[in-house]
Image: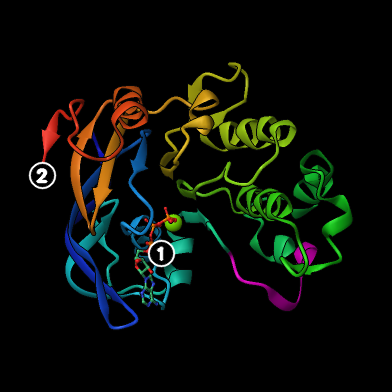
């Protein structure tokens, strides 16, 4: 299997504090991997590090994407290579309208993505500054619309269903599914080799996408990996203490 993303012994700091303490993780081409872990364990920091946000400083280790070492690349270089991210808490972007960002980000026809805004219930938001005054659920739909415009090959999703009401969970879940699967010709089940790393606490998003592997992060390290549903069941029953569902422990 081709390795899409390979992270080796990654250490990183935020606010002069070491948050990632030797992360090892691999996502293969076409795979969706889930990242579980308690609050504050470093999951969002890991995704921010993969995307290259300047809030995090890599002190050692490497991030290799499709065979290229991207550890020192800028965010825009990584985005151009095909990496995209839906943030847990994206910032307000004053002075930039959502519709204008979509026109800039659209990898293919911006017009068709803008026309699609209605399907994301985002048509009335295109003239608004990005995230400014958006509700929690509106931010999630806006982030997904932006990702749909960018059409990344490797998608980082940080709690896509968190704070979303039950009716809109369906919309979010189906749109995430559409990002990962090719709809052309063969229905919804043929993967177009898009890979993803998805953070979820509840596992609700897994009702809409098939996940191939799962990792549990604790205190800045990946402590175990296993089958997504086995790990989720274990976490729901026993929390994050001793994990009976791990296939590999202390990676
Ligand atoms: N700039 C910073 N300065 C100091 N500490 C930081 C900074 N950024 C992150 N941290 C700390 O790093 C730890 C990991 O944060 P992170 O957001 O990655 O956790 P998480 O696993 O995503 O948690 P959650 O499930 O609550 O979203 C937290 O204790 C957080 O307070
Ligand atoms: Mg987080």
Residue 95 falls inside the magenta stretch: yes
Number of residues whose C-alpha sits closer than 10 Å to that of mark 1, classed few (under 14), some (14–19) or many (20 or more): some
In screen coordinates, is 234 left or right of 178? Answer: left
Which numbered disc flags the more N-terminal residue, 2 or 1? 1
Q: In the picture shown, does residue 196 fall above or below 1?
A: below
Indicate yes or no: mark 1 CB to ligand 1 under 8 Å: yes
The residue at 52%/18% (across/down) is 189
Q: Quadrant of ligand 1?
A: bottom left
Q: Quadrant of residue 48?
A: bottom left
The numbered mark at residue 250 is 2
Scheme of colours in the image: rainbow
The numbered mark at residue 48 is 1
In screen coordinates, is 82 left or right of 216? Answer: right
Residue 130 falls inside the magenta stretch: no
Q: Quadrant of residue 179?
A: top right
Q: Which residues are magenta?
A: 90-100
């Amino acid at each position: 299997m081709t390795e899409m993303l390979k992270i080796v012994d990654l250490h990183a700091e935020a606010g002069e504090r070491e948050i990632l303490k030797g992360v090892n993780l691999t996502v293969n081409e076409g795979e969706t991997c889930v990242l579980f872990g308690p609050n504050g364990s470093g999951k969002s920091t890991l995704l921010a590090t993969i995307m290259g946000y300047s809030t995090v400083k890599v002190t050692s280790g490497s991030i290799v994407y499709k065979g290229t070492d991207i550890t020192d690349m800028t965010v825009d270089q990584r985005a151009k290579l095909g990496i995209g991210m839906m943030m847990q808490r994206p910032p307000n972007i004053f002075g930039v309208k959502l519709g204008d960002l979509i026109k800039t980000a659209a990898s293919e026809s911006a017009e068709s993505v803008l026309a699609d805004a209605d399907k994301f219930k985002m048509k009335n938001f295109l003239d608004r500054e990005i995230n400014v005054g958006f509700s929690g659920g509106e931010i999630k739909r806006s982030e997904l619309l932006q990702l749909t415009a960018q059409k990344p090959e490797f998608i980082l999703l940080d709690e896509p269903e968190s704070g979303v009401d039950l009716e809109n969970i369906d919309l979010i879940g189906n749109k995430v599914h559409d990002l990962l699967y090719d709809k052309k010709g063969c229905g919804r089940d043929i993967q177009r080799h898009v890979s993803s790393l998805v953070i979820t606490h509840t596992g609700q998003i897994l009702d809409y996408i098939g996940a191939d592997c799962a990792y549990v992060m604790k205190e800045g390290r990946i402590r175990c990996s296993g089958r997504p549903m086995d790990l989720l069941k274990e976490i729901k029953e026993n929390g994050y203490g001793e994990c009976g569902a791990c296939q590999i422990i202390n990676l």
